[in-house]
């Protein structure tokens, strides 16, 4: 989910480079088509498709996942990356802004895991990788809704890992820090410099670095790792 740009797009590309067949989900048809066009321009033979179901709609998600299962016969990896921000001070934050962030970031992950886990359970294998955030570990002023949603993803990860472990299914979370994306590109130089100074490694992370970790967690090399939150944040959460 959230595979049309930024970290999600980087994960899609890395998975394709490593031989996976990928179905990427995006919020709008036009963004999905743009991502597919970009990927096909790099390699026309890459087995990648796209869809744009409403992550907050349980029935739509169930159908989208069933369609993938019907087409490919099995699903091996789920990456919950979709996320939005609607920042603001808590005392001024509207209920709508709080609810919409929770609905996409946390409830969306709940829907995908709930519907996809039935297939994982039948085949007694599967990898679930949830993209949380360093904000879900440390909190962040002006992001009460976002931080709460990403902290919720951590709790969802740990509980799901306990429920599914006996069937050979691993569930882990990645907590990225300050990563080069469209959002950081739009920041003023002074704000970006302040943020970089707060990172022990003194640099902004790259989406590809998160994608490399997502490849590892999707591989057999991580078969004995479950219920973990791996911070890829240059040391921010030390």
Image: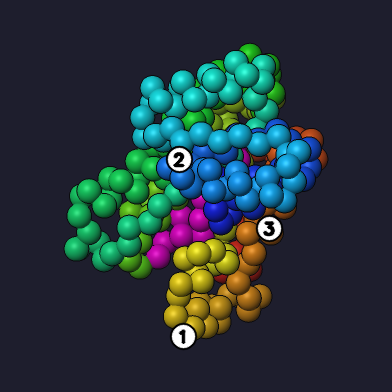
Question: Which of 184/36 is in front?
Answer: 36
Asked which secondary structure carries label 1, the reply is helix
**Which of the numbered marks, if any, corresponds to residue 190?**
1
Disc 3 packing (10 Å; few <14; some 14–19; many ≥20): some
The residue stretch that appears in magenta: 128-140
Q: Residue at x 40, y 48 (%)?
A: 149
Q: Residue at x 50, y 69 (%)?
A: 184
Can residue 121 be spotted in the picture?
Answer: no
Magenta residue check for 118: no
Q: Residue at x 66, y 36 (%)?
A: 48
Instruction: Of the two numbered discs 2 and 1 on the same chain, state the one appearing first in sequence.
Output: 2
Instruction: Of the two numbered discs 2 and 3 on the same chain, state the one appearing first in sequence.
Output: 2
The answer for how far apart the CA atoms under marks 2 and 1 are is 35 Å
Magenta residue check for 131: yes
- Answer with the quarter of the image where residue 225 lies: top right
- Answer with the quarter of the image where residue 204 lies: bottom right
Q: Which residue position is annotated with label 3? A: 208
Q: Position of residue 78 (x, y in %)?
A: 60, 34
Whether residue 27 is situated above or below residue 91 in the rendered picture: above
Indicate left or right for 103 with 226 as reference.
left
Question: Which of 227/113 is in front?
Answer: 113
Q: Which residue position is annotated with label 2? A: 29
Asked which secondary structure carries label 2, the reply is helix
In what quadrant of the picture does the C terminus appear? bottom right
The answer for how far apart the CA atoms under marks 3 and 1 are is 25 Å
């Amino acid at each position: 989910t959230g595979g049309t740009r930024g970290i999600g797009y980087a994960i899609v590309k890395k998975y394709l480079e490593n031989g996976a067949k990928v179905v990427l989900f995006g919020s709008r048809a036009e963004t999905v088509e743009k991502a597919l066009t970009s990927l096909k321009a790099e390699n026309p033979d890459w087995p990648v498709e796209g869809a744009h179901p409403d992550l907050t709609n349980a029935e739509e998600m169930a159908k989208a996942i069933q369609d993938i299962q019907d087409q490919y016969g099995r699903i091996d990896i789920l990456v919950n990356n979709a996320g939005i921000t609607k920042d603001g001070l808590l005392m001024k934050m509207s209920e709508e802004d709080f609810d919409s962030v929770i609905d996409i970031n946390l409830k969306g992950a709940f829907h995908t895991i709930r519907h996809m886990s039935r297939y994982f359970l039948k085949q007694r294998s599967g990898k679930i990788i949830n993209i949380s955030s360093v904000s879900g570990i440390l909190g962040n002023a002006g992001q009460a809704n976002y931080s709460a949603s990403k902290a919720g993803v951590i709790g969802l990860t740990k509980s799901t890992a306990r429920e599914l472990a006996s069937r050979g299914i691993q569930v882990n979370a990645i907590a990225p820090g300050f990563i080069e994306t469209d959002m950081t590109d739009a920041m003023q130089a002074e704000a970006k410099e302040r943020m970089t100074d707060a990172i022990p490694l003194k640099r902004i992370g790259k989406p590809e670095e998160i994608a490399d970790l997502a490849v590892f967690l999707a591989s057999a090399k991580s078969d004995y790792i479950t219920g973990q939150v791996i911070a890829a944040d240059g040391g921010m959460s030390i």
